[in-house]
Amino acid sequence: MDPRKRMEVLAAELLRHQHLYYVLARPEISDAEYDRRLDELVQLEERYPQYAGPNSPSRRVGSDLDGSFPERPHAVPVLSLDKLYEAREAAQWLRKTAAACGNDPGFTVEEKIDGASIVLYYERGELQHALTRGNGLAGSDVSDNVRTIRQVPLRIAEAGSLAVRGEIYITRDDFARFNAGLPEKYANPRNLAAGSLRNLKSSLTARVPLNIFVYEGFFPMGENSGRDHLEVLARLRDLGFRINPRLGFFCDSEPRRRKAQELFPGAVSAPLAGVEDYLLRLGTARAGVAYDVDGLVLKLADLEMRQELGFTAHHPRWAMAYKFEAPQARSELLDVLVQVGRNGRVTPVALLRPVRLSGSTVTRATLHNQDTIDMLELGIGDQVAISKRGDVIPAVDEVLEKSEANPSVYRLPERCPFCASRLVRDGAHHFCRNGSCPERQRRALSYFCAREQMDIESLGEKTIAFLYGKGWLRTIPDIYCFDYARLEGEEGFKERKIARIRAGVEKSREQPFARVLAALGFEGLAAAVAAALIAHGFDDVDKIIAGAARGDWEAFAAVEGIGEVTARQLVDHFTAAANLELIARLRDAGLRFRAEGPSAERIDDSFAGQVWVITGSFESFNPRSLAADEIRRRGGRVAENVTARTTHLLAGASPGSKLAKAEKLKVQVISESGFLERLQSGKQSNNGG
């Protein structure tokens, strides 16, 4: 047999047997026979390296070559989750969300495994990249290390693009055995899993007993993904991904519960009223699970309704994490520190008598707002119970004993402690509305320079505080105007440090538009929102400003994942004179306010004001993202689901339920040939035809 053909046959056989052994636990051949075939493949790859693919089964053993971890942008939303700590509150959230959705929505409950988050990107059936969560906008490329995990499919039967989110973890028994042989011990399985993904030699990662469960799939424009989350999970399972069988589905519709049982026979399926008992039961039973579980995730299953609910700057509105109860400790409230954020929000912080909790000394805890303080009836000198919610953030849970010397409840000051401006209450929070407040300015500078934003590492908080105190930095554009030579002779600023600051500032001018946009610090405009705007055609700041100038919040709300609240905030931000001046000054400083790449090349405005949804398969647009690019390059926007805002449906072969919904809403339906004619007619018009 031809060597190349033999290598392809061996690779296909070995990948199949790896899936049978590590995912399905149904081996068909002996270990010796498997090793014989793998040895043959390795020998052929050594003789014919030009035929060895990046996802060859031989990659499971890793490489001894040192590697770095380049940063790559995420193509899908990679957000955190909002959190609750009582089963009753989680059940209330589910009922409230269900009421907002109507039409018998369904919810899944899945284990929140304490491991390392990963996003797998596939193109034309091949694993291309595996990225850590990073800052949600971009992650570290750890592909070579992830390829060593035998439960990760290297090839799948999916021709288009696919992104899959999952959690890499280690069982407690495997951790104990592996950790025992290490000279320097890891504290817990999560740290070992995360550390293994960052080994410079993938051959070291291959020795670690890593596992994976996947929990979200992002198919191109919804293709083959189904209408709800359970169908997505079933599709992923059929493609060879490992799905956690410990799954719950809650819905008041009996037919939907029956369908859930058909898709996942081992899943718990019950009406919405049963979710609280289920959460409590799993919380009690988690000690018997083979791996660490630090909570449960409740998710709305209906994909179209997810689109309607969207997400905030930090988390989706259609999902909630229920975190298991954390250990408590007793302390005394010594004082309350009032912090003011870059957008003026006032946050009270409890200053506590030092106490040991979960392996660290706690001296501070969040109090959120005045409502939280009132609910706790908290005052200076009180004895309090504190916990590390999510095992990370200390919080005051309750007052155990009121202070006899000071039995009153603490009240936030009427004026900002940094600028003396009167604080204004808006909803549950107080705000300092003074844009010239020194604390707001300093926080805005620190946020802009932070690693997750513009990544000017040499301008840390202490350096910024020093420069601000000197009056040298006041606003963000000052970072690019200040003459850092003036630092010469100042204590702590030697020539090398000054050079690093200059280099960091200069390098930040090269940051992509998405980072610049998020770093502006506007309320609600986080990294995920910036990425979503750019992906849907708002790839130039002038386009965003123009949309805001028209008051067209619906244009922003048409972007997948951006709800009405965030859309209206964007209009406010990009019409405010101070913000427009900030953008102009930063543009003059050389920062990038336009995305690079083909998607940013505007051809004309023939689709301006139009919102398109794409469904079905096409001969001329494979993958379908090619059609989406054509729409965006002509000023149109592309959405995931058909809604009342949709103006056009591009329908290919096998269009599915979206066609029926479009017809019901009287949305204009365009065939592939009709779409090509529109593209051609627009091209002729541009050429004077």
Image (cartoon, grey):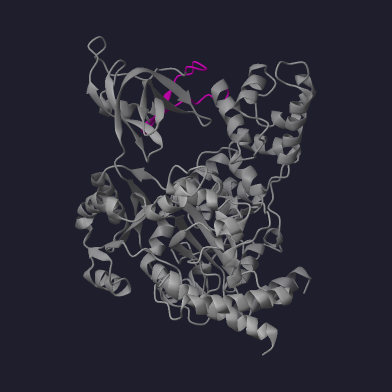
The extreme top residue here reads 405
Q: Quadrant of the N terminus?
A: bottom right
**Residue 567, how many percent across, how many down?**
50, 48
Look at the image and say whether residue 301 sits in the magenta stretch: no
Q: Nearer the viewer, residue 294 or 205?
A: 205
Q: How many numbered discs, if any?
A: 0
**Nearer-the-camera pick, 325 or 226:** 325
* Dominant secondary structure, magenta: loop
Q: Is residue 95 left or right of residue 207?
A: left
In depth, the one of 160 and 171 nearer the eye is: 171
User: Which residue sits at x=48%, y=78%?
Assistant: 655
Q: Is residue 608 left or right of residue 258?
A: right
Considering only vertical position in the picture, is 416 above or below 95? above
Does residue 394 show up?
A: yes
Residue 170 vertical position relative to residue 88 in the rendered view, above or below: below
Q: Please, is residue 466 above or below residue 72 in the view? A: above
**x, y percent for residue 506:** 76, 37
Q: Would you say residue 434 sits in the magenta stretch?
A: yes
Q: Which residues are magenta?
A: 417-437
* The image quarter in which residue 680 lies: bottom right
User: Does residue 581 lie above or below 545 as drawn?
Assistant: above
| Residue 395, percent from left and from top | 35, 31
Is residue 622 visible from the viewing direction of this image?
no
The quarter of the rendered structure image containing the C terminus is: bottom right
Q: Residue at x 26, y 43 (%)?
A: 86
Relative image position of residue 421 (x, y in whole percent): 49, 18
**Front-most of 441 and 549?**
441
